[in-house]
Image: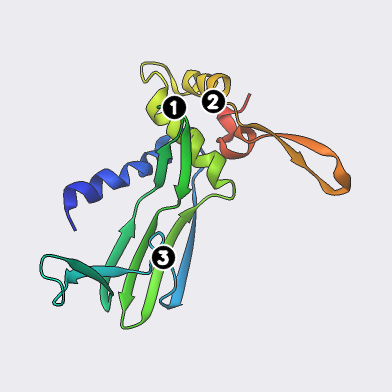
Amino acid sequence: MNIKYFLRDLRWLKIINSPFKLFNIKIYAGKTSIGVPYFLPRKWVKNKDKPGYNKAVPLKVGFSYCGLGWKTKWDDEDYRFEWNPVFSFVFFGYQIAIMIYNEHSNHYWESWLYYEYSTDKNKSKRERIEECRRNYPQTWWVASKGGTKETIDYYDLILKRKYLK
């Protein structure tokens, strides 16, 4: 694993010192079944049948990691969450996985990405959050039981108390 890329992938840890609530951690221990992100932990080896090609084989013993998965869709500020960070250690068919998540992962990570990459870093944290609310709103209509619609501003659920309106 290239340490330079690993450290760059840990940029999502900056959320700890941001206006966003701390993420949750879930630990899994059992048979290897947690993907990083889409495939079970694996490594690439030379393919003896096809010189010059590699093939994926299951990881027997080792560490795997995937950082926060995200992309931009229609423009540079249209952030899309894809997967949560996962740290995984595999040992002969068994795995310990540490999964980082939030109950509202899409809204949480997409809003933080906008905060981190699209707001003016010369402003205070509070001013940057106001910029997020104005330019990257997280107000959604949600159907509730009985067919009625409810409005939810996810910023109220993902921000630390002192950054709420």
- Above or below, comparing residue 83 to residue 142 in the picture: below
**Residue sitting at 40 percent across and 76 percent down?**
32
Q: Amino acid at mark 1?
A: Glu
Mark 2 belongs to which amino acid? Tyr
Colour scheme shown: rainbow
Q: Amino acid at mark 3?
A: Gly
Residue located at (49% from left, 48% from top): 23
**Residue 63 in the image: above or below residue 151:** below
Residue 27 placement (x, y as % from top left): 46, 66
Dot 3, crowdedness within 10 Å: few (<14), some or many (≥20)? Answer: some
Residue assigned mark 2 = 136
- The disc label shown at residue 17, or none: none
Q: CA distance from mark 1 to mark 2?
A: 9 Å
Q: SS at mark 3? A: loop
Placement of 21 over or under 87, stated as above or below: above
Secondary structure type for disc 1: loop
Q: How many marks?
A: 3
Disc 1 vs disc 2: Cβ atoms closer than 8 Å?
yes
Quarter of the view holding residue 121: top left
SS class of the residue under badge 2? loop
User: Where does the image place residue 156, in percent across and percent down from the top left?
Assistant: 64, 34
Q: Which residue has dot 3 on it?
A: 35
* 57 left or right, relative to 116: left
- Residue 126 horizontal side relative to residue 157, left or right: left
Marking on residue 77 = 1
Q: Position of residue 87 (x, y in %)?
A: 36, 61
In this rendering, which labeled residue sits more in front, label 1 or label 2?
Answer: 1
Q: Quadrant of residue 106?
A: top right
